[in-house]
Amino acid sequence: MDLHAIAPHIPRLRRYARALAGDQHAADDLVQDTLERAINKRHLWRPDSDLRAWLFAIMHNVFVNQLRARSAHPEAALADDDLPPVPSAQGARLEIRDLESALALLPPEQREIVLLVGLEQFSYAEVARALDIPIGTVMSRLFRGRERLRTLVTGALPAPALKAVK
């Protein structure tokens, strides 16, 4: 693999990492760890495969490993009171902040699929290959993630599930 082939994918990796990690410094670390692993494991990349999907699969694995390490050593979370005040005239920024907060509340397995499909515009098949999960799992996690996001952002309760009547 030509190492220069990775460079065009870095902006997308950074955007995805920022959305996953929710913090610029953690996202930069995630991208750096992903690129380091990709370079060290470049002999495992198959030339007939999608480099973008391979890089996102590496990022997924690095992110999951970091989550496991963090759960072994939990840190104190910031309270909303610790966040800097935002002027009320910045409605769009508040909406983005609300969306980021809602994304952070999703379980990681739903958040990464919502981001890969919604932000990175991966197809379901590409997500399934990148995360090494069945396409049906991608679809169900995406559905549950979108429903949870909708509930968190709008405050609306999800529609009741229909029941079969005999």
Image (spheres, grey):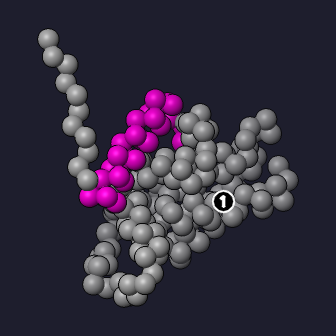
In the foreground, 73 or 148: 148
In the foreground, 135 or 162: 162
Residue at image x 66%, y 45%? 53
Whether residue 148 is in magenta: the answer is: yes
Q: Quadrant of the C terminus?
A: top left
Q: Residue most toward the left?
A: 166
Describe residue 43's horizontal placement relative to residue 108 as left or right: right
SS for callout 1: helix
Residue at image x 29%, y 79%? 80
Q: Residues within 10 Å of mark 1 (few under 14, many from 20)?
A: some
Q: Whole-percent x and y of residue 157?
A: 23, 49
Locate residue 15: give its quadrant. bottom right
The kind of residue on which mark 1 rests is Arg
Q: Whole-percent x and y of residue 62?
A: 54, 56
Whether residue 130 is in magenta: the answer is: no
The answer, for residue 146, to whether it is visible in the render is yes
Q: Which residue is mark 1?
A: 12
Q: Residue most toward the front?
A: 89
Q: Whole-percent x and y of residue 143?
A: 40, 40
Principal secondary structure, stretch drawn in magenta? helix
The magenta segment is 131-155
Describe residue 13's horizontal placement relative to residue 74 as left or right: right
Q: Whole-percent x and y of residue 96?
A: 45, 69
159 w.r.t. 76: above or below: above
Describe residue 133's horizontal placement relative to residue 1 as left or right: left
Locate residue 13: give its quadrant. bottom right
